[in-house]
Every structure is written in structure tokens, then in C-alpha cells.
Image (cartoon, grey):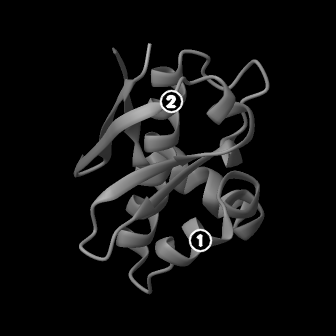
Amino acid sequence: MKILQGIDLLKTERIQKVYLKFGDKFLSKIFSLKEIEQIKDKNKYKYTNKIASKFSAKEATSKAIGTGFSEGVKFKDIEILNKENGKPFVKLHGNASQKVDEILSSSVSISDEDDLVITIVTFIVKN
């Protein structure tokens, strides 16, 4: 058994600038349709934070995998979804799923304060 962990700290202003420049084109390049459905919110503040939170979780996941976004791992290979109660979880696809041994357990924790989002992702994998 092995523990893999990644962390990411992100200024929401960075995401807001990119989103204002590229709009839904940015979302469709980075997120799956399910993720975009979960992001949609009429409140612009919450909207930007939801985008930043999922983006940060993808970054932390890529770090836990150990590759970042290299070696064929793409943003859409990592899906950050939420259960009905809001708890986030990770689904790996494509090259991302091939980089990690059998996942026995995973955890995603996302927190935001003012203009910052911090995320930590932990996988317990078969060794």
C-alpha cells in the first residue's frame, strides 16, 4: 500500500481573468460536461470560486499522480465531481488512470477564503 498526495494553492483572480477572456471556450477545454453542469451558478462570485475550486483540485490530483500535466496526462483525464451533499471526489480517465496503481481509497478537500483556493488530494493505492 502506498499514499500519494498533492496540494495546490490558487488565486481565484487568475481563473477569473482567463474566464473573462475566453468564457465557455475555457470551460470546455478544461472541464467535462458533468463538471460544467456542477459549476453553473447565477452568482458570479460563486461561479468563479467553483471554477477555481475544480481547477485547483485537478492541479492537486496531477501532483498526487506524480506527473503534473505531462506524460500525456490532460485536464479532462481528471474529473472533479461532487456528491449530492457537496463532497468532492476524483474520477480518473485515460492516461491519468494508467499512471496510478489500483486506487483503494481517495480523498479531496477544497477550501476557499477571499481570493484563495487550496486543495489537497490523497490516494491510497495498491503497491
Q: Is residue 59 left or right of residue 68?
A: left
Left or right: where does residue 70 sit relative to residue 99? right
Instruction: Determine the secondary structure under disc 1.
Output: helix
Q: Which mark is residue 34?
A: 1
Q: Determine crowd level at label 1: few under 14, some 14-19, many 20+ residues with C-alpha closer than 10 A.
A: few
> Which amino acid lies under the numbered mark 2 shown in the image of this protein?
Glu
> Which quadrant holds residue 27?
bottom right
The kind of secondary structure element at disc 2 is loop
Task: Compare residues 124 and 90 and report the one nearer the observer.
Answer: 124
What is the quadrant of the N terminus in the image? top left
Percent x, y for residue 90? Answer: 46, 48
Which of the two discs, 1 and 2, labels the residue nearer the N terminus?
1
Image quadrant assignment for residue 116: top left
Given the image, on which type of amino acid does mark 1 rest? Lys
- Left or right: 101 in relation to 98: left
Depth check: give the residue in front, 19 or 67: 67
113 vs 96: above or below: below
Image x and y of residue 78, in percent: 60, 44
- Please name the residue that numbered disc 2 is placed on: 102
Give residue 95's quadrant in the image: top right
Residue under the image location 54 percent in, 23 percent down: 101
**For the point 37% across and 34% down, which residue is it?**
104
Residue drawn at 49 percent across, 71 percent down: 39
Q: Residue at x 74, y 63 (%)?
A: 28
Which residue occupies the extreme bottom position in the image? Answer: 42
Using the image, determine if residue 120 lies above or below residue 82.
above
State the CA–CA distance, disc 1 to disc 2: 24 Å
